[in-house]
Image: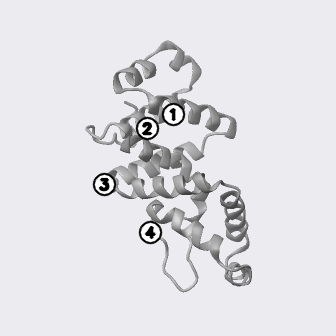
Amino acid sequence: MFRSFCLSAILTLSLGTGLFAQRIPGRGPIGGPAREAALIERWSQMPPEQRRKALEKVPPERRRRIEEQLRQYQNLTPEQRQQLKFRSEMFGQLPPERQEFARRLFRQFNQLPAERQNMVRDEFQSLRAMPPPDRRARIQSDEFREKYDNREQMFLRQFSRLLNPGLPPPQPNQGR
């Protein structure tokens, strides 16, 4: 169960991708995804005037991203917000090498076209729910190979490895 929360965190944190390196006025940079939900929450809970003043100090493109992410966050149900916070905390409990591996996978995922991201996300959710033997069988199936291009297959294989804490993360150029 811990692994599935960690895995979900990778994809769920797309809500706040641009906030990883954001600064909160008067504080240093935020260190990573484990604090992501807290950062979004903090911006969200600022009084409007304080938020406006803080956002005036942010470059326009970054400001636009923050405002969009705040809108997305505010549209979440309380349960979804709590789940995002929990997943973020679980991600923070991964060893540093697994966190870095997850970040690389997340960057690769974000480079996929939007329509392919949806397909890969759905497959990821399915793989996450499977026991390891079923997951391996799915990844080795002809249907899997026909449905996803090489890059997507590599991403899903590596993501599957992240689900299995007994295996070391693959090297960046390693597909299996």
How far apart are labels 1 and 3 at the CA level?
21 Å
Residue designated by label 1: 124
Tell me the element at label 4: loop
Tell me the element at label 3: loop
Task: Say which mark, if any, is on residue 95.
Answer: 3
Answer with mark 1 or mark 3, whichever residue precedes in sequence. 3
Of residues 11 and 47, the one nearer the viewer is 47
Tell me the element at label 1: helix
The amino acid sitting under disc 4 is Gly
What crowding class fits label 1: few (fewer than 14 Cα within 10 Å), some (14-19), or many (20 or more)?
some
How far apart are labels 4 and 3 at the CA level?
15 Å
The amino acid sitting under disc 2 is Phe
Residue 139 image offset from top left, x and y in percent: 44, 22
Residue designated by label 2: 159
Circles 4, 3 touching at the beta carbon (< 8 Å): no
Quarter of the figure with the C terminus: top left
Residue designated by label 4: 31
Q: Residue at x 69, y 61 (%)?
A: 74
Q: Residue at x 42, y 40 (%)?
A: 4
Circles 1, 3 touching at the beta carbon (< 8 Å): no
Residue 68 image offset from top left, x and y in percent: 72, 61
Q: Residue furthest front?
A: 78
